[in-house]
Amino acid sequence: MAAHHTVAARTGADLRRSVLVVDVEQVWRELLSRAIGRLAGVECAGTAGSVERAVVLAETAPPSVLLVDPDFPGVPAGAVLRRLVTAAPDAALVVLVDADAADLDGVPAFAVVSKRSPLDEVLGAVTAAPARVAAPGPALTRRELEVLELLERGRSATVIAAHLVMSPATCRSHLAALRRKLGAHSLLEVVVRAQHLGLAGRPGRDG
C-alpha cells in the first residue's frame, strides 16, 4: 500500500531526523530501529512498547518523527495517537496499520503505511517527513551536570560523592533526578540519553 502523505513536503535545510518507534510488538520495534539506524541523516531516538513509556520518551527528548502502530490492547487507536502527538506536538506522525485502511479518529498523520508494505516503503515515509532542529532537552542544575559528567566517565556513586564532597544520600538524590528528567530506567541509560541530547558540558542552572 502506498503511503498517504497529508502534510506538505519539508521546508528549510535537510536536518537530521530522530525517530521514536512505538509498537507493542518487540520484533517490529527491533526491526524498525535497526533499519532506521542504517539510514543516512536519520537516527532512532528510542523505542517503546507501551503508550506510557512512549510519552515519557517523547516528552524527554521530542523526536522529529513518531513512527507508531497504534494497535494497543484495550486502547482506541485515536486515543493512543492523541497522547503521543500531545507529548511531541512538533513531530511528524507516521502511522503503521495492519489493514489497508485505519480509523485514526481524526488525528492528522503525515503518512499512513500498511505493515504489509515493503520495509523500504515504511522507511521512505520516515525520510520524507519534515526534519526539524532537535529540542534542547531537560533543564539540569549545575550540580546534576557535575554528577552526570563523572557518571559518563564511569565513576561509581561512591566515587562521585567523594569527588564532589557530598554525602552518598545527596549523590543518590542527584542520580534519581537525572533518571527522572531523562526518562531513564538505569544509570547506563542516563549516560546514553545524555550523550544523545548533547548534555555533556552544557552550563546548568543554579540549584
Image (spheres, rainbow, N blue to C red):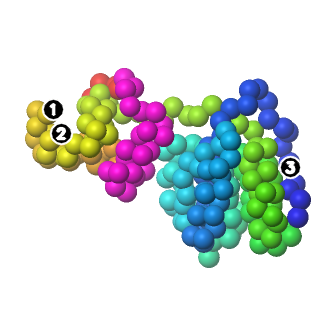
Camera-nearest residue between 38 and 19? 38
C-alpha separation, residue under disc 1 versus residue under disc 3: 52 Å
Q: Viewer-proximal residue, 169 or 31?
A: 31
Secondary structure state at the residue bearing disc 2:
helix
**Residue 3 in view, yes or no:** yes
User: Are discs 2 and 1 less than 8 Å apart at CB?
Assistant: yes
Indicate the amino acid at tag 1. Answer: Leu
Residue on which disc 3 sits: 5
Region rendered in magenta:
181-203
Q: Is residue 135 above or below residue 113?
A: above
**Mark 2 nearby-residue class (10 Å; few <14, some 14–19, many ≥20):** many
Residue of label 1: 164
Determine which residue is flagged by label 2: 160
Q: Secondary structure at mark 1?
A: loop
What is the C-alpha distance between the residues marked 2 and 1? 6 Å
Q: CA distance from mark 2 to mark 3?
A: 50 Å
